[in-house]
Image (spheres, rainbow, N blue to C red):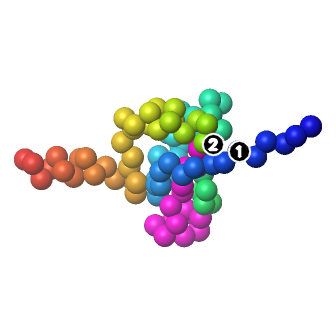
């Protein structure tokens, strides 16, 4: 039996544990993915982001699924900061 070797493509990076949890809850059981360097976030916070790696045949589907999700990157919302500047 032949083993298939799939290629994984990076989709996004984040430093936020909240982002990781939300993305995992959306993707778990639906597509094949992993977070590269996820464990470094606790060892080297703000130096090594977790990188969402998506199996290439799911890439466009996941990109569309996450297109409306607002990443927090570092546990803060950039959108809220911009809102304060407009007022």
Image label count: 2
- Callout 1: SS: loop
In the orientation shown, which residue stands out farthest toward the top? 30
Q: Nearer the viewer, residue 31 or 22?
A: 31
- Callout 2: SS: strand
Q: Which residue is mark 1?
A: 6
Q: Are marks 1 and 2 in contact (CB under 8 Å)?
A: yes
Q: Is residue 25 shown to the viewer in this render?
A: no
Picture coordinates of residue 79 (x, y %)?
Answer: 25, 47
Picture coordinates of residue 84 (x, y %)?
Answer: 14, 50
In the image, taking residue 25 as reference, residue 4 lies left or right, namely: right
Residue sitting at x 52%, y 66%: 48
Picture coordinates of residue 68 (x, y %)?
Answer: 37, 35
In the orientation shown, which residue stands out farthest toward the front? 2
Q: Is residue 1 magenta?
A: no
In the orientation shown, which residue stands out farthest toward the left? 87
In the image, taking residue 70 as reference, residue 5 lies left or right, namely: right
Residue sitting at x 54%, y 52%: 10
Picture coordinates of residue 77 (x, y %)?
Answer: 31, 49
Residue sitting at x 40%, y 54%: 73
* Picture quarter with the N terminus: top right
Residue sitting at x 79%, y 42%: 4
Q: Which residue is mark 2?
A: 55
């Amino acid at each position: 039996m032949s083993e298939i070797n799939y290629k994984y493509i990076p989709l996004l990076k984040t430093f936020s544990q909240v982002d990781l949890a939300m993305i995992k809850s959306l993707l778990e059981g639906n597509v094949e993915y992993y977070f590269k360097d996820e464990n470094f976030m606790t060892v080297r916070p703000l130096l090594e982001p977790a990188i969402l790696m998506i199996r290439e045949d799911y890439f466009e589907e996941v990109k569309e699924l996450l297109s409306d999700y607002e990443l927090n990157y570092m546990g803060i919302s950039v959108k809220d900061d911009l809102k304060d500047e407009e007022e």
